[in-house]
Amino acid sequence: NGHHMGLSRLVSALAGAPMFYHAGKISKIVGTEMVLVASVLSYALRFAIYATMKNPYHGLPAEALRGLTFGLFWTTGTIYAHEIAPLGMSATMLMLLNAMYGGLGQSLGAVLGGKMQSLFGT
């Protein structure tokens, strides 16, 4: 219902916002590649939580992981794209990152997720 959705979005926003601020420092300390690996592992854990939850409140820990899965990933992903870009190609690398994550990744995830839901149910 609306209460559960609002609470989930609140937890998600509170967890994600600080990561955008601290991501640069974290990436410098830990390294961009390690941060990206941790983000992908956090996505796996987040989706496992969603897959096994029995009531809406069980999703709150998954929403708290949004800081690692999106805030830290996105900021560090842009840093990494800039680091590996050939001279003068940083904007192109950022465009490719955005196209893969926001375009191909989300579109493919929506299509495959819809197919799986129609096959297996919710």
Image (spheres, rainbow, N blue to C red):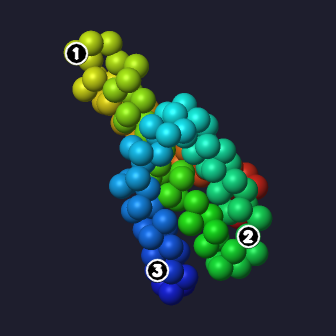
Q: CA distance from mark 2 to mark 1?
A: 46 Å
On the rendered structure, is 71 left or right of 116? left
Q: Name the N-terminal-most of marks 2 and 1.
A: 2
Q: Nearer the viewer, mark 3 or mark 1?
A: 1
Residue 16, can we see it? yes
Instruction: Tell me if residue 115 comes above or below residue 103 in the rendering.
Output: below
Q: How many marks?
A: 3
Q: Secondary structure at mark 2?
A: loop
Considering depth in this image, is 118 or 5 the residue closer to the camera?
A: 5
**Residue type (three-letter) at the residue carrying disc 2:** Met
**Residue type (three-letter) at the residue carrying disc 3:** Gly
- Residue appearing at x 50%, y 73% in the figure: 11
Q: Residues within 10 Å of mark 2 (few under 14, many from 20)?
A: few
Residue 108, can we see it? no
Instruction: Tell me if residue 84 comes above or below residue 63 in the rendering.
Output: above
Q: Residue furthest top?
A: 87
Badge number at residue 25: none
Question: Disc 1 marks which residue?
Answer: 88
**Residue type (three-letter) at the residue carrying disc 1:** Gly
Check contact, mark 3 vs mark 2: CB within 8 A: no
Question: Disc 3 marks which residue?
Answer: 6
Q: Residue furthest front?
A: 29
Badge number at residue 53: 2
Residue 48: x %, y % from top left = 73, 56
Residue 52: x %, y % from top left = 77, 64
Q: Secondary structure at mark 1?
A: loop
Q: CA distance from mark 3 to mark 2?
A: 17 Å
Q: Residues within 10 Å of mark 1 (few under 14, many from 20)?
A: few
Q: Residues within 10 Å of mark 3 (few under 14, many from 20)?
A: few
Q: Nearer the viewer, mark 2 or mark 1?
A: 1
